[in-house]
Amino acid sequence: MTLLHTSPALVLLLGWSGALLSFSRGAPPSVCGAIGGLAALGLSLLSAKRMDKRLACVASLLVALAALGGFFISWRASVEPTLPQAVEGKGVVVMERPWGGRRALVMDVSGRRWLIYASPALALKEGDSVYLKGFPRRLSEAREPGEFDPHLYWRARGVSGEVLTTELKRSGGGGSLLGWWRTRLRRFLLLRLPPRLRGYMSAALLGVRDPELEERHRRWGTVHLLAVSGFHVGLVAVVFRKLFRNVPLAPAWVSACIWLYTLMTGAAPSALRAALMIEAMILAGWIGRPQSPVHSVSLAAVALLLWRPWWFWDVGWRLSVLAALTLASLASVARTWYGAVAASPTVWCTTAAQIAYTFGSVPLGGLIVNLVAIPAFSLLFPLGAAASLLALLPLPLVGWALWGVEFIFALCEFGLSALSRLLPGELVWFPQLSLVSAVTLFALLGRAVKLSGLRWLIFLLVALVPFV
C-alpha cells in the first residue's frame, strides 16, 4: 500500500500548502498552481514503486487537482471583494468579541458579513437583530511582516470589509436562533456556576475564554485545552457514540451531535477541521471503507482551504492541522502504549515553532504537564458538563455538588502548576526551531504513509524547501 492508496488527500494538502506558501511570497496564482501540481507529481512518483495503469490514473487526477486547486485558492486569496457605496439595512450579529477597548462585531447584512468596531456600552450580543448604516472600506492589513494581520484573520471568517458606522442600533424581530441560544447559555453559565467551573465550561461549550484562566494555562503550556479543537470534538464524539450505541442509525445521530456542538462553540477552524475529520472517519466506517487517520485529517484540511483559503494563515487552523497530522501519524506508526506516551511530547515538538513564532515563546513545562493534563481533562470536561446540567435542577444539594466539582478543578490546577515547575522556563523562537518542527512532522508522515529508505529521506528533504 502506498501514499496514493492510503492518503491521497495528503498529496493535495501538501501541494496546496506549497501553492499558498508561494503566494504569500509574492508568486502569481498561475505559478502557485504550477507549484502545487509539481509537488503532487513529485509525491506521486516518490510513493509509487511501480506505476501501473490504475495508479497512473490516480496520480494524474491528483496532479490535475493539485494544480487547478492551487491556482484557484491562490486566485481567491488575491481577489478583494467589491464594496458597495454604502451599507444600510437590518442584520444579525453573528460574532462578538473583545477587541482592545472596543467590541468587534461581525454582522450579516443581506447575505454579506461586515466588521464593525463598536462601543461596549451598546451591549450588543450574538443573535441580536441590528439596524446598520455606514460606509464600507477594505480591511486593514499588517503594518510589518510577521505582525498580526487583521485582513487575513477576518477574511478567514467570511468578512467582506469594515463598516464605518453612522447609525447602529438594536432592531426588533429577526435575530439568529443559534446566537440567541449561545447568549442564553453564556448567561446561564455566568449566573449559575462557580468561577473556575464557569470559565472551563464557557471555553468548552461556547469557545469563550476567561482571560485569567487563559493566562494560567499559557504559563503551563496547556492553553490548547481552552481552545475548542479536536480534543473537545473527539470527547463529544466518544460520549455520544456510547449514548447512541444501540440506537438505529447511530452514526447519523453522532454526526448531528458533533455538528451541533461545533456550531454552538462558534465554529472555530480547529473545531471545523476536527468535525470534518471525524465525519470522514464515521462515513468510511459506515460504508465499510478502511479508515486512514492521515487521510481524514488531510481531507478535512483541504476542504477548509477550498472553502476559505485564508485559513492557511490562521494560527488556529495551522496548530490544529499540525497537531492532528502528528497524532494521526503516530497512530499509524506506533499502535502500542508507548505511542500514546510519546503523543504529547511529539505534538509539542511539531507545534513549538508555530507557537513560539506567534506568541513569542513556548513553555518548556508543557512537555511534562500535557502528559497529565490531557487525560485529566478528558475526564474533567464531561464531569463539568454533567455538573452544569445538574445546575438546571432545583435541588437543595446542587450548590454543594457544583462547589465540589469546582474544588476538583482547583486541585487539578494545583497539580499542573506543580508539574510545570519541574521544567521551568520558556523556549524563544529562533529560525532553526521551525526546521526542527518541520523535520519531526515530515519524518513521522513519511513513516505513516509507508515510505522507507531513500524515498523516506527524499520526502524528509521536502521539509527543507520552505527554508531555502
Image: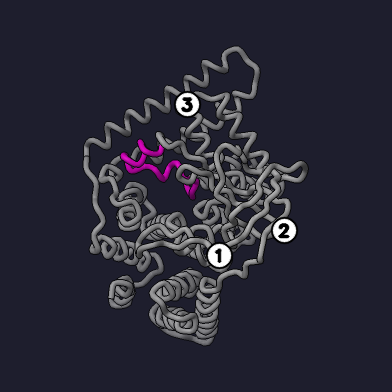
- Residue 437: in sight, yes or no? yes
Amino acid carrying mark 2 in the image: Ser
Amino acid carrying mark 3 in the image: Pro
240 is higher (above) or lower (below) than 453? above
**Left-right relation of 33 to 113:** left
Residue 201: image location, x then y, percent = 52, 34
Residue topped by disc 3: 195
Q: What distance separates the C-alpha of mark 1 from that of mark 3?
A: 36 Å
- Which residue is nearer to you in this view: 294 or 197? 197
Which residue is drawn at the image coordinates 58% and 51% (left, top)?
A: 116
Q: Secondary structure at mark 1?
A: loop
**For mark 3, does the 10 Å Cα neighbourhood hold few (<14), some (14 to 19), or many (20 or more) residues?**
some
Outermost residue to the top: 396
401 is higher (above) or lower (below) than 86? above
Residue topped by disc 2: 110
Mark 1 or mark 3, earlier in chain = 3
Residue 348: image location, x then y, percent = 32, 51
Q: What distance separates the C-alpha of mark 2 from that of mark 3?
A: 39 Å
Image quadrant occupied by the N terminus: bottom left
Q: Secondary structure at mark 2?
A: loop
**For mark 1, does the 10 Å Cα neighbourhood hold few (<14), some (14 to 19), or many (20 or more) residues?**
some
Query: Magenta region: which residues?
Result: 214-231
Residue topped by disc 1: 308
Residue 183, quarter of the rendered image: top right
